[in-house]
Amino acid sequence: MRRLLAACLATCLALPAWAQSHDTLTVDLPGDVATMDPQIQWDTESYSVYRNIFDNLVTRDGSGKIIPQVATDWHYANDTSVVFNLRTDITFHDGSKLTPEDVVFSVRRITNPAFKSPQLSQFDQIVSAEVTGPAQVTLHTKSPYPVLLAQLVKLSIIPKAYVEKVGDTEFNQHVIGSGPFRLASWQRGVQTNLVANDSYWRGKPAFKTVTFRAVPDTATRIADLKTGRADITRGLSPDDATDLKSAKGLDVRAVATERVAYLFVNTLFGPTKDKRVRQAIAMAVDRDTIISALQQGFAKPTSVVLSPVDFGYDPTIKPWPYDPDAARKLIKEAGAEGATIPFLTSPAYDRRLNEAVQQMLADVGLKVVISVVDQPTYLKRRLGTPEEASALSQGRWSCGCLDADGVIFPLFRSGSVWSKFADPAFDAEVDAARATLDEQVRLAHYHKAFEILHDEVPGVGLFQDEAIYLVKHDIAWTPTPDEAFFVYSMHYTD
Amino acid sequence: MNKSLLLLFYRKEALAFFLSRAGQALLATFGVLTIVFFIMRLSGDPTLLLVPEGASAAQIAELRHQLGFDQPLAVQYLAYLHDMARFDFGESLVQRAPVWGIVTERLPYTVALAAGALVVALGVGIPAGIVMAVARGSWVERALAGVVLAGQSLPTFWSGILLILLFGVVLGWLPTSGVDGFSSVIMPSLALGAVAMSTFARMTRIAVLDELQRDYVNAARARGLSRWQAVRRHVLRNAAIPVVTIAALEIGNLLAGAVIVESVFAWPGLGQLAIQSIQSRDFLVVQAVVLFISLVYVAANLVADLAYAAIDPRIRAGG
């Protein structure tokens, strides 16, 4: 009891720490860091924080191109083996050198099923990792795996000796990496404090300290920016962004991301089993109105279920035109006038978009019945049998790999839990695109795959979602499509 | 029956009363444990929320197996009861840290907030109630009734944002969010305490009005005491009985209200933890938080019963 009282008193009397200077950066995140260990959770909040503490084998530049980081260069020894040469001048925050053993350990740890990493499915194509030189490692994959590098962008390199010495639990609490910032303190649910790693191999960061705070309410985060308690925040809605466009000293910065908003259409059960009904739905949905009215312009139209920044996006495939008359005609032909179309959704999805689609489909003679369930129930049904999955639902998809393989394969390949589409020709194309490392050949397969998707309509691409940040005007930083949040690339302009 | 026998009889009665209430409390706690366990599982296990988009059916099944959610519900429930009996709250599925540590880290924040809210509720509510009773029918009562009504009616997520805008953004007097010393607890306490304040004001007003009509007040006035003196010396003690019992129960309501207030003000207490854990289906953390809050409810009820008996001599005498 006495300890509790002391803790309460300490909570109330802690010194105010909201004096801002150009040496410090305060970031308001919508949630708390789940784990500091980069090999466990990869939710946006945890990812935003720990990626500043660790280096990765490879990374992406502002344009999304994969570039070296811990690896200086790489080459394919054969279709299933990639050799990485490593830098030799990187040290962890405890002063120990980053070695090939650390890289191999990082790969083996996350791919070990006993470690129970939820990220395992992103790396389980890697069958082994070995040290093949004083500054070299080789990774072997089950089969030719063109997305390997894109997945490795998400693999943080952790210090083998330290992790083995302190154990997984302690490592999660007091992580050590080789990145531009080191962990100073982590108060769960409150904030995470990072301090600059002055001996960082890419040079000293612009900020001496960085604080990430967990502030769930958007209005409160905006108030924090307005009063100078925070310098940058994310997760603004298009409405918030529109209201804040003239806010003094603050910039709304948006970037079109790899997250694509789409309408899932069940091809295996219910009224949408008829291709004509699906094509009619594609022609009844008015993307432009959705983007201008609901997204306030913070979105870009997409013709397929893939973001234009992803590898495999094909601008030659044109979207179905908005043509309610043609849609009505097709529905009449299919004998589906007045058909009831179940629409499954959860509070995680924009209610207004659901209702807009409901209205648009009502205009062409379909009766959409929206049922809202909680997110786990939604996932259970959506990933369940075609009978459980409802005829329509809204979805947002991002694989974090900027590649069509991470989007249309899980969404539409027969046998995948998300797919309610079975087309052998489509399966053959996406399988072939997955089995070769030749980019031109892959693009050709994806072209054919998207042609099939366009005609069969197992999904309707709506728009490329934008990530909206509120940033102090004098902080130089451009958000990137992969929503990476690297403080190292930020600095004050004066 | 002589005096010592009477005392013994009273003690036995009191012990039986206490034991029966404690037994009921235990039963209520068991009921809560069971309900939380099954409600959390009704809508599916958290595996689907934990795997990345694009995981295959086999990968999902593998993780489900590793987490033990493929076991029959009855087996999971027995294992859960076994753990609870040993006060083993397990390890968070999402945070990979002991649940006990996660909950106790957040506890001081919620206790500090609830204490602040109780100070607001009692400090404003009781004087307001007394004034409303004594100044019945005047403009003062009507003005205070307006404040009480506002406290009762304004939803905390809205009043919280209004407080932030006024005191944080416009006036710049108080920090808009987070935990930065004493000044940070003021706005959340006001927002959280407002509803309880209204309850106390209304209860106190009714209790004082009720007492003011008693003969002993007329007698006190006849002895020459002013209305306020009579209130201070005689009425307040008697009017305190219902108010004290309500105070104990309001602590439970404050914990419930903390869920919203903590989210608005980014106050890192149990309420915010509960929301985060429910969203990420972190079963074990949700169970521990709900268990804790229900224990506070049960304990508060027990204390209310005992306090009621302690304050009112008629109850003590078995009357």
Image (cartoon, rainbow, N blue to C red):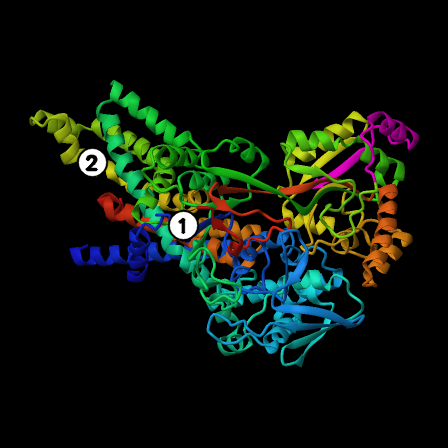
Residue B201 higher or lower than A455, as above or below:
above
Three-letter residue code for mark 2: Leu
What are the residue bounds of the magenta stretch?
A318-345
- Can you tell which of label 2 and label 1 is closer to the viewer? 1
Image location of residue B67, percent across then percent down: 62, 65
Residue A485 higher or lower than B221, as above or below:
below
Query: For numbered disc 2, what is the local secondary structure?
Result: helix
**Front residue of this view, candidates A50 and A68:** A68
Residue B299 higher or lower than B191, as above or below:
below
- In which quadrant of the rendered view does residue A465 lie? top right
Image location of residue A243, percent across then percent down: 52, 31
Residue underneath mark 2: B236
Q: Is residue B265 left or right of residue A108?
A: left
Which residue occupies 63% across, 36% down? A298
Q: Which mark is residue A214?
A: none
| Chain ID, mark 1 | A
Three-letter residue code for mark 1: His
Query: For numbered disc 1, what is the local secondary structure?
Result: loop
Residue underneath mark 1: A22
Which residue occupies 91% across, 53% down? A425
Q: Is residue A348 left or right of residue B110?
A: right
* Residue B245 visible in this rendered orientation of the protein: no
CB within 8 Å, label 2 to label 1: no
Which residue occupies 20% across, 39% down? B237
**Front residue of this view, candidates A371 and A68:** A68
- In which quadrant of the rendered view does residue B52 lie? bottom right
